[in-house]
Structures are given as structure tokens and as C-alpha cells.
Amino acid sequence: MARISACVSLRLPKERLTVFTGVSGSGKSSVVFGTVAVESQRQLNETFGAYVRHRLPKHERPRAARMANLTAAVVVDQKPVGGGARSTVGTMTEVHALLRVLFSRRGEPSAGPATAYSFHDPQGMCPECDGLGRKVAPDLGRLIDEDRSLDEGALALHPVGSAPWQIYARSGRFDPAKPLRDFTARERELLLYGSGFKVRRGKYDNTYEGVLVRFDRLYLKRAREQVDEEARPYVTERTCPACGGARLNAAALASVIDGRNLAGYCAMEVTGLIEVLDRLGDPVAACTRATCTGSATCCWSCATRATRCWSSSTTAT
């Protein structure tokens, strides 16, 4: 039993699910996160040597007269998980960074240093999808209405009368009253992909961009990781055909350890990954295993042996 004694006494049964309830501000988080969890982490940190303790988070002793029989705590806090479109469980826990170091040491044929196995880095990312594992493309059926003319609002993102609409409808290159389905092949090509000339609009000369050229520039090239909300209804998303969703380039995917490439290791369940790492007999593999299981002591011990290789890797990606 874990016991907390101060102005009140509290006993928490072990191996049971305990739920704290109460109105907002009643102290639920203070007891769970600010008292029990903090003291558990503080006591655990005191078991390490000075070198390790210096690099761990510092926790003040909670304001309690006595706390006894606490076990190691795993804290799942209420903060949202950060990260970008390329972030995964592996990158957030540094397991992926360690696997990259492992492949830089043991992968055959080698793709190079650890950065060559990173889908964050140009050395390792798939050039087709920029390491995202997916391709976003315009949905032409939603961008244009083949049954309408330009004057009838055939361009979904460019309402009649808007500046972009004027560039197409008043360019003199199309009949604005003709439905798009009746355009010739040359007119259709010009509408969608045309470029290289100016269109007079009032007092201004505007550079002409085809509908798809303009859409790609404004919505896809500027935000490869996250499509703008305005454009989202007009795109389709699919697995990258070049890397099959693995995010890495051909050289990184060709490198294997015991018949598996890095994407194969990342796709494994943690229990299966631990079994594979145990068979490798490599200090970096042991450190990766320790990170997967949350064994801090083992992780620091193994990391000490692998420091030189670890230092070649960049931030966890």
C-alpha cells in the first residue's frame, strides 16, 4: 500500500485501478501528478549515480510528512502530444533514433550514417513524398464542374467575379459561356496547365497560371506536411507509390539486418521488436531494447558503451 500522510492520510491499493473524481480545482491533479507521481519519480532518480542524476529531471520533495511503499510511476499527463506530420511513437520515444544508429552500424548494404536512415533528412527521406509516406494530389472532379461554363461558376475555388476567375474568364483564350466538357484538348490543357504569358485585368498585367498549376503552388508546395483547410475538400490522399508508405529512399530501404529493413523493424509490435533486438548482441540494440521497455538503468549503461555511435546521430527523427 502507498501511504501519504500530511493534513490528510491516503492509502492507495496496489494492482488496482483507482479513480480520483471531484469538481474542477478540488486537487485531483495535485494528488496524482504533483504528489504521488513526483515522489515516485524522485525516489527512483535517487537510485542512480551522480552522473545520471545530473541529466535527469529535477523533482522537489512534495509537501507530505511521510510517503511510503511507492513503486515506479509511469505518468501519462494531460498535455497534448506535440510533433509534426512526420512524428511517430518511435521518433517521440527516441526508439527510431536508436534504430537508425543500429542500421548505420549493422545494415547491409550500408546507406551511410544515421541521418541516411531518417525520413526527416534529405539524405534518407523518400524524394517522391518528402518523407511523409503519402502523396496529396488535386481532385480534378471537385476543382472543376465539367457541366458548367466559366460564367456559370465552373471553377470551385474561384467564384464568378473574383480576381482569379477574371484571369481565366476574361483572358480572351476561352469562350466563357461554353461548358468545360466542350473545350478542345488544347483549351483544356491551357486552362489546367497553361503558363508563360500575361493577362490584362483592369490596370494590371497578371501572370497566367493554369488552374492546377496555381492550386499546386498555393496549396500543395507551401504546405507539404498539412494541407490548408480551404483546399482539403479538393485533394485526394494516397500511399506514396515510390516508398510504399515507408517514407525512406531506396538506399535506406535496401539496407537490411537479418532480412528486415528499417521500415520492417518500425512496423513490428514492441514485444516482437524486443525479441529481435535480443538476438543481435549489439550495444545499440541493447540500448534500443531498454528504451522500448522503459528500463532506464539498462538504457544508460548501454548508451555509455554506444556513445561514440550515438553522437553521429542528429536529433531524434
Image: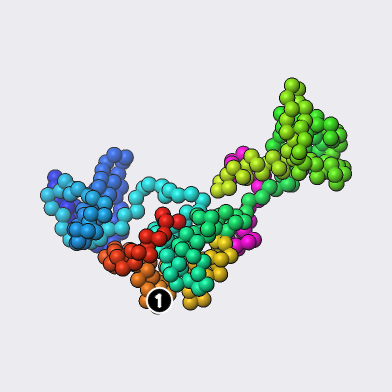
Q: Is residue 304 magenta?
A: no
Using the rendered view, name the quadrant where residue 104 is placed.
bottom left
Q: Is residue 168 above or below residue 235?
A: above
Q: Is residue 241 magenta?
A: yes
Using the rendered view, name the quadrant where residue 240 is placed.
bottom right
- The residue at 32%/40% (across/down) is 24
Residue 68 left/right relative to 119: left
Residue 74, image x, y percentages: 31, 58
Residue 238 left/right relative to 20: right
Q: Is residue 220 above or below residue 285?
A: above
Q: Residues within 10 Å of mark 1 (few under 14, many from 20)?
A: some
Residue at the limit of the structure toward the top, as seen here: 203
Using the rendered view, name the quadrant where residue 302 is placed.
bottom left
For the residue pair 238 and 300, the one nearer the viewer reads as 300
- The residue at 75%/40% (across/down) is 195
Any part of residue 46 in sight: yes
- The residue at 66%/47% (across/down) is 235
- The residue at 80%/29% (across/down) is 170
> What range is drawn magenta here?
227-245
Residue 278 left/right relative to 45: right
Local secondary structure at mark 1: helix
Residue 3, image x, y percentages: 17, 56
In this figure, which colouring scheme has been used for the structure?
Answer: rainbow
Residue 243 left/right relative to 268: right
What amino acid is found at the position of numbered circle 1 in the picture? Leu
For the residue pair 208 and 77, the one nearer the viewer reads as 208
Residue under label 1, please give it.
Answer: 280
Q: Is residue 262 above or below residue 225?
A: below
**Which image quarter is the N terminus in?**
bottom left
Residue at the limit of the structure toward the left, as seen here: 65
Residue 204, image x, y percentages: 73, 24
Residue 108, image x, y percentages: 50, 73
